[in-house]
Image: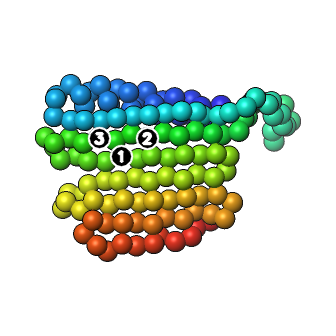
Amino acid sequence: MAFKISLTAILLLLVLFHEKADAGGHAHSFQHFHGPVIGDAREVTWKDKHGHHDHDYVAHPHYEFSYGVEDHHTGDYHGQKEHRDGKEVVGEYTIKEPGGNIRTVKYHAGKDGFFAHVLNSNGNDHDVGHHH
């Protein structure tokens, strides 16, 4: 449930940012969201350390989102896209650094851990590697 609330808050901020960025006429932004879950939710109950019964609802996480900003006035250029199906997550984000380098990080995570590959427009590409 907290995940849904957090995701909703993020989406609201993206919408507000999108409207503000378009107001000056110097920026372009986009957003896309589909999800956050598929299938029926099922109730999960447990007993906390004080002996109280708690419950929540869970469903199969399945979403995709993307957003981006390109502001010619400030030079701001960044974006992200991600897709999740269950425990598998695949995505990438891009940002233009102050020196002009464009850094792109492509990542995926799942049962085998987290993997990222960093690409820089000015060279110096790096594999971040495997993390648990």
Q: How many residues crowd around disc 3 within 10 Å: few (fewer than 14), some, or many (20 or more)?
A: many
Label 3's element? strand
Mark 3, residue position: 69
Verify CB contact (< 8 Å) between mark 1 and mark 2: yes
Label 2's element? strand
Q: Is residue 2 visible?
A: no
x, y (%) of residue 86?
A: 68, 46
Rendered image quadrant of residue 112: bottom right
Q: Judge left or right: residue 102 versus residue 53.
A: left
Q: Judge left or right: residue 91 versus residue 99.
A: right
Front residue of this view, candidates 121 and 96: 121
x, y (%) of residue 14?
A: 39, 32
Quarter holding the C terminus is bottom right
Q: How many numbered tags mark residues here?
A: 3
Q: Is residue 119 above or below residue 87?
A: below
Verify CB contact (< 8 Å) between mark 3 and mark 1: yes
Rendered image quadrant of residue 123: bottom left
Q: Residue at x 27, y 65 (%)?
A: 121
The disc placed on residue 87 is none
Q: Judge left or right: residue 21 versus residue 74.
A: right
Q: Is residue 103 above or below residue 2?
A: below
**Who comes first in sequence, dot 1 or dot 2?**
2
> As shown in the figure, which amino acid type bears the numbered disc 2?
Ser
> As shown in the figure, which amino acid type bears the numbered disc 3?
Val
> As shown in the figure, which amino acid type bears the numbered disc 1?
Gly
Mark 1, residue position: 79
The disc placed on residue 66 is 2
Q: CA distance from mark 2 to mark 3?
A: 11 Å
Q: Residue at x 35, y 26 (%)?
A: 16
Q: Is residue 69 above or below residue 56?
A: below
